[in-house]
Amino acid sequence: MTQQTPDTPQTPDYPAMIVPVGHVEPVPRRIRGFVAGRPVFDTVRARYVWLWPGYPQYCVPRDDIVEGALVDEGRSMALKVGGARRQTLQVGSLTRPGAAWEWGEDAPSGIVGHVSFRWEAIDAWFEEDEQVFVHPRSPYTRVDALRSGRAVRVELDGAVLADAPSSVMVLETGLPTRYYLDRVYLDWTRMEPTETVTSCPYKGMTSGYWSVRTDTATHPDLAWTYDFPTRQVSPIAGLVAFYNEKVDLYLDGKPLPRPVPVSRANWEKEHR
């Protein structure tokens, strides 16, 4: 029997995304979008459509968009689940070409006549009265933060970066388990703070990132923390996690294979 090492590829040990591309569902929440402080749309009739398995897009009925906010560019778009017409967004003196697209007759029936927006074209998105970041939250994604007494050791290039008797495990559908560790168990002589900031619709905005320096190399942005995470994952506040994909991680003394990095490009490659 072949012995597993941290670099030995294997079948993922976490649940995969199950939503097929092209799937449409109603959004049971009020969805609003603002640009420069002005409303662009306000709807309780939005739909989800999945263009890749990881998370959906919002589709807003044209009637629920502020009149005059969209200008058809006269350009057709061939998207994964159907055709659409490209739209320019105009709000006051602001003009954002290619900010949206209106779904055509060959799109799934539930979204024909609806409009989807590039996420970054809208300054602020809200579900009910709570702001949403990065992308819509998938109704099929679950995120749990569980305290665990299983020992976690993190190594890289033969150096021990952390050796903790416990952790908070974050289990998120479609992603490897992340192990958040108390700071007292990290070797801070190898950690170098960076200016990197990332956001997650389920966990919030990071408050710190660190590169790791070993005896042979400096590895950029391997660890992060959320000082003020969303209430759903509040147990991780102030704890530090490392990318399993880039370090050697041991759970109860047993090596865990490095997972394949997860990205939209990988999802699309596997499901095209």
Image (cartoon, rainbow, N blue to C red):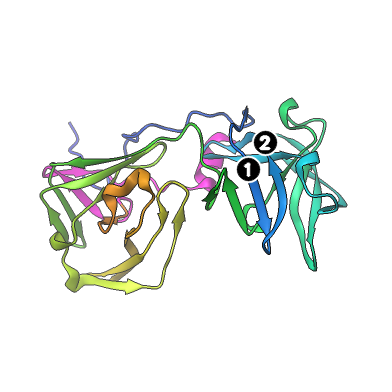
| Residue 247, magenta (yes or no) | yes
Q: Which residues are magenta?
A: 244-272
Residue 51 makes an appearance in the image = yes
From the top left corner, tell me how far across and down residue 25 is, in percent: 62, 28
From the top left corner, tell me how far across and down residue 99 is, in percent: 73, 55
Q: Is residue 131 left or right of residue 228?
A: right
| Residue where numbered disc 1 is placed | 31
**Farthest-out residue, front:** 129
Q: Quadrant of residue 104?
A: top right
Q: Is residue 165 left or right of residue 256?
A: left
CB atoms of marks 1 and 2 within 8 Å: yes
**Farthest-out residue, top:** 109
| Residue 265, magenta (yes or no) | yes
| Residue where numbered disc 2 is placed | 46
Cα distance, mark 1 to mark 2?
7 Å
From the top left corner, tell me how far across and down residue 227 is, in percent: 32, 60
Q: Is residue 195 left or right of residue 34?
A: left
**Rendered position, 31 above or below 198:** above
Q: Is residue 192 left or right of residue 140?
A: left
Q: Earlier in the sequence, mark 1 or mark 2?
A: 1
Which one is in front, 86 or 137? 137
| Residue type highlighted by circle 1 | Ile
- The 10 Å Cα crowd at callout 2, few under 14, some 14 to 19, many 20 or more, is many
